Amino acid sequence: MLAALAAVAGALAAWAGVIVTVLMVLWNKQDKRFDDFEARQNRRFDQQDKRFDELAAEMRDNRAEMRALREALLSGKAPAKT
């Protein structure tokens, strides 16, 4: 009776080890997928930040040009060609 109980406990322990191993493999695979996704997101955000910086610089240039044109119109001078 004790030997049978020990055999059942051993079998359950072995299956528990297999289940834990499978769960660890699946977890690592999912973790790698998440890391890859995060890296793609970071690259996309970096590209967007670069585009936003370029647009902001273009807006600053356009504002400066508009300011110069407005000042030229208000002062009666001919605007400089750019």
Image (tube, rainbow, N blue to C red):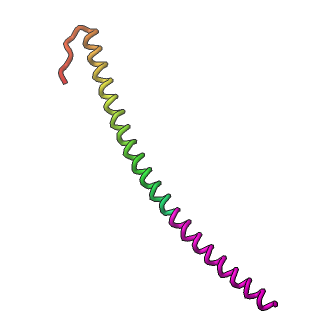
Identified at 77% across, 89% down, the residue is 4
Q: Which residues are magenta?
A: 1-30
- In the rendered image, residue 23, in percent from the top left (x then y), is placed at 59, 69
- In the rendered image, residue 55, in percent from the top left (x then y), is placed at 34, 34
- In the rendered image, residue 5, in percent from the top left (x then y), is placed at 78, 86
Residue 29 magenta-drawn?
A: yes
Main SS of the magenta part reads helix
Question: Does 15 appear above or below 43?
Answer: below
Residue 54 magenta-drawn?
A: no
Identified at 49% across, 63% down, the residue is 32
Identified at 52% across, 62% down, the residue is 31
Give the quarter of the figure containing the N terminus.
bottom right
- Left or right of 60? Residue 24 is right
Which residue lies most toward the right here?
1
Tally the marks: 0
- Left or right of 69? Residue 14 is right
Which residue lies most toward the left here?
81
- Left or right of 81? Residue 20 is right
- The foreground one among 32 and 78 is 32
Q: Quadrant of residue 49?
A: top left
- In the rendered image, residue 3, in percent from the top left (x then y), is placed at 78, 91
- The foreground one among 82 and 28 is 28
Identified at 33% across, 23% down, the residue is 63
